């Protein structure tokens, strides 16, 4: 779905996702059930440091009988958290165009970055 942002990855297994089931939406719109396995996150490149371009990939064990795995970003996955009292409305949302910062200066780091002309 997205370009590969480099050869270097870190791997992590998020404890809060460890046993969660989910569904993900394929390119053609098909919904496929899966279960979280671990996450691959790009490192050592400019894209992974820039929030609108950052993509990590959650590796899912597919539960459709195919025996395959899938690596999908967050915005293609609906997590099934059975600790909720009632089912939530399912929505797919692409990352907002706003970049939020911890500092209150309001200066976007991209506006002050050194670039080549």
Image (tube, helix red, strand yellow):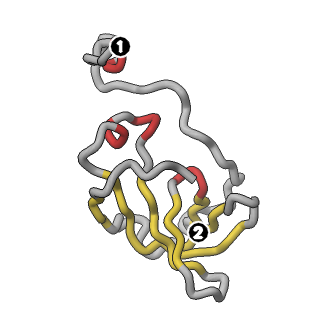
- CA separation in Å, label 2 and label 1: 38 Å
Q: Which mark is residue 111?
A: 1
Q: Secondary structure at mark 2?
A: strand
Q: Position of residue 10 (x, y in %)?
A: 27, 60
Q: Nearer the viewer, residue 10 or 106?
A: 10
Dot 1 alpha-carbon crowd within 10 angstroms: few under 14, some 14 to 19, many 20 or more: few
Residue depth check, mark 2 versus mark 1: number of the one nearer the observer: 1
What residue is rendered at 27% in x and 57% in y? 8
Judge left or right: residue 63 versus residue 17. Answer: right
What residue is rendered at 63% in x and 86% in y? 66
What residue is rendered at 54% in x and 37% in y? 95
Question: Which residue sits furthest right?
Answer: 29
Q: Position of residue 18 (x, y in %)?
A: 41, 72
What residue is rendered at 58% in x and 68% in y? 22
The quadrant holding residue 68 is: bottom right
Residue identifier under label 2: 22
């Amino acid at each position: 779905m997205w370009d590969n942002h480099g050869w270097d990855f870190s791997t992590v297994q998020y404890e809060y996702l460890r046993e969660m089931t989910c569904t993900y939406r394929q390119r053609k719109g098909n919904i496929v059930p899966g279960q979280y396995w671990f996450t691959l996150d790009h490192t050592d490149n400019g894209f992974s440091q820039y929030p609108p371009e950052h993509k990590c990939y959650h590796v899912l064990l597919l539960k459709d009988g195919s025996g395959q795995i899938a690596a999908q970003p967050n915005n293609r996955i609906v997590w099934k958290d059975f600790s909720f009292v009632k089912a939530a409305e399912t929505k797919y949302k692409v990352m907002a165009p706003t970049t939020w910062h911890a500092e209150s200066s309001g200066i976007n780091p991209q506006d002050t970055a050194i670039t080549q002309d």
